[in-house]
Amino acid sequence: MKLLLWLAIAVFVIWVIRSNKSSNKTSAAAGTGRPDRSNKSNRQIEPMLQCAHCGVYVPVSETVTDASGKVFCSDDHRLQHARS
């Protein structure tokens, strides 16, 4: 009988701990109105441009342009495109 009582207490404690964890997660997400993405919150959306040599899309801040205004993903591709 004592074993059954201790088992019931253990199950109750586990249930309380799990319900507290899940309610903390839902209240944190509900407070902001969106999922928690704290590591991405400071990023700005940046336009992407296509490399004239290989066709890969690259963020504007990482592009290299030549004298004619063509956009490249790297200086190597700019030079390779100029040779061909």
Image: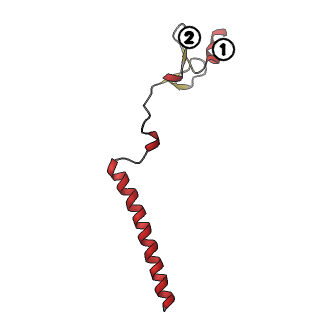
Amino acid type, residue under disc 1 in the picture: Gln
Please identify the quarter of the rendering in which residue 18 is found.
bottom left
Q: Nearer the viewer, mark 2 or mark 1?
A: 2
Mark number displayed over residue 66: 2
Amino acid type, residue under disc 2 in the picture: Asp
Q: Is residue 19 above or below residue 84?
A: below
Q: Nearer the viewer, residue 57 or 21?
A: 21
Measuring from the top left, give residue 22's x and y in whole percent.
41, 62
Measuring from the top left, give residue 28's x and y in whole percent.
37, 53
Residue at 40%, 48% in the rendered image: 35
Residue at 61%, 14% in the rendered image: 78
Q: Is 82 left, or right, of 12 in this rendering?
A: right
Residue that sits furthest to the top in the current view: 67
Residue at 53%, 26% in the rendered image: 57
Q: Is residue 78 above or below residue 3?
A: above
Residue at 60%, 18% in the rendered image: 53
Mark number displayed over residue 2: none
Q: Which residue is mark 1?
A: 80
Q: Quadrant of the C terminus?
A: top right
Q: Is residue 35 above or below residue 78?
A: below
Please identify the quarter of the rendering in which residue 73 is found.
top right
Badge 2 marks a residue whose secondary structure is loop
Badge 1 marks a residue whose secondary structure is helix
Measuring from the top left, give residue 27's x and y in whole percent.
35, 56
Q: How many marks?
A: 2
At label 1, counting other C-alpha atoms closer than 10 Å, the crowd grade (few under 14, some 14-19, many 20 or more) is few
Q: CA distance from mark 2 to mark 1?
A: 12 Å
Please identify the quarter of the rendering in which residue 21 is found.
bottom left
At label 2, counting other C-alpha atoms closer than 10 Å, the crowd grade (few under 14, some 14-19, many 20 or more) is few
Mark sitting earlier along the chain (2/1): 2
Q: Nearer the viewer, residue 3 or 76?
A: 3
